[in-house]
Amino acid sequence: MNAERTAASNAPGTAPSGTSPKVAVVTGAGSGIGRSVALELLAAGWSVALAGRRTETLEETAALASASSDDAVLRVRTDVSRPEDVSALFSRVADAFGRLDLLFNNAGTFGPGGVPVEELPYDAWRHVVDTNLNGAFLCAQAAFRQMKEQDPQGGRIINNGSISAHAPRPNSVAYTATKHALTGLTKALSLDGRPYRIAVGQIDIGNAATDMTERMQSGILQANGQLATEPVMDVADVARTVRHMAELPLEANVQFATVLATNMPYVGRG
């Protein structure tokens, strides 16, 4: 487990002198939505632990942050499907920052695209479940333990759901099943967190412009069997929404938020 901390200094948007910045863990922080959210939080004065499977992409995220923020950055190579990795991640966060205010449970994978259910290998199914669902549970469990015991008590967890938590795409059984399950996880965690001032919500995202959605602009299979291009939105709009959810007082919670490209085929018949 590799981790590195870069010391913070006073910069625009950071916490006032004599106070400590809020602390966030962002999983899947090496690319896409996770990277964008991490940069948004850093620019707003948070201290952020960047978690992901590839050290080099975490370093790239940290380098991008240096131009806009000098806040503390912790990089921890983490496979969220491995309990020992998750335990080490949250131990490093406790050692480096002393508390945890936010977990953005973002790490995930779509799995093999376009594979019919009858042809999907069990190993591929298991990989998606281990990453999207088991990984989210392990990180939430570790965050719960820390938020429950710290002083002041409490914190916030935001799970990255998906439009697929509401409606599937063709040939996406593993991804869709895990995202529906994530909604149940969010509801259960939200209820169980009440006695400990732990607020839990979910953001369901549709067609944010990342590497994962490049295929939307070249044509993707629709429910009617046709291929169609789909509009995408700036991933920065997602990051701003997560930041809004994160910065609410713990007495308020966005239970579910849906942020999507306005004209994507989701509402009604598209």
Image (cartoon, rainbow, N blue to C red):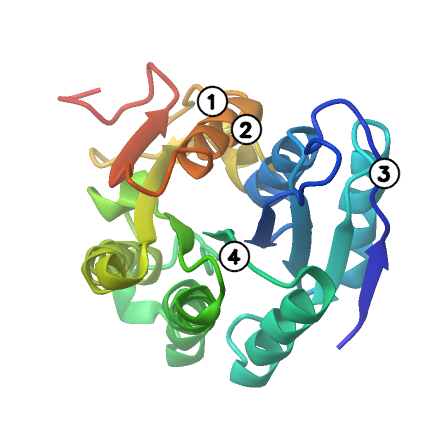
Residue 260 as seen in the image, left or right of residue 103:
left
| Nearer to the camera, 48 or 233 | 48
Which of labels 3 and 4 is toward the front? Answer: 3
Where does label 4 land, which residue? 107
Q: Whole-percent x and y of residue 20?
A: 67, 45
Q: Cβ–Cβ below 8 Å for labels 3 and 2?
A: no
Describe the element under mark 2 as helix, strand or loop.
loop
Q: Return the disc, 1 or 4, that comes first in the chain's sequence.
A: 4
Q: Return the disc, 1 or 2, that comes first in the chain's sequence.
A: 2
How many angstroms separate mark 1 from mark 4 (CA)?
Answer: 20 Å
- Callout 4 amino acid: Ala
Describe the element under mark 3 as helix, strand or loop.
loop
Where does label 3 land, which residue? 9
Q: Whole-percent x and y of residue 226?
A: 30, 31
Which of labels 3 and 2 is toward the front? Answer: 3
Residue 224 as seen in the image, left or right of residue 28:
left
- Callout 1 amino acid: Val
Where does label 2 land, which residue? 209
How many angstroms separate mark 4 from mark 2 (CA)?
Answer: 16 Å
Which of labels 4 and 2 is toward the front? Answer: 4
Q: Quadrant of residue 36?
A: top right
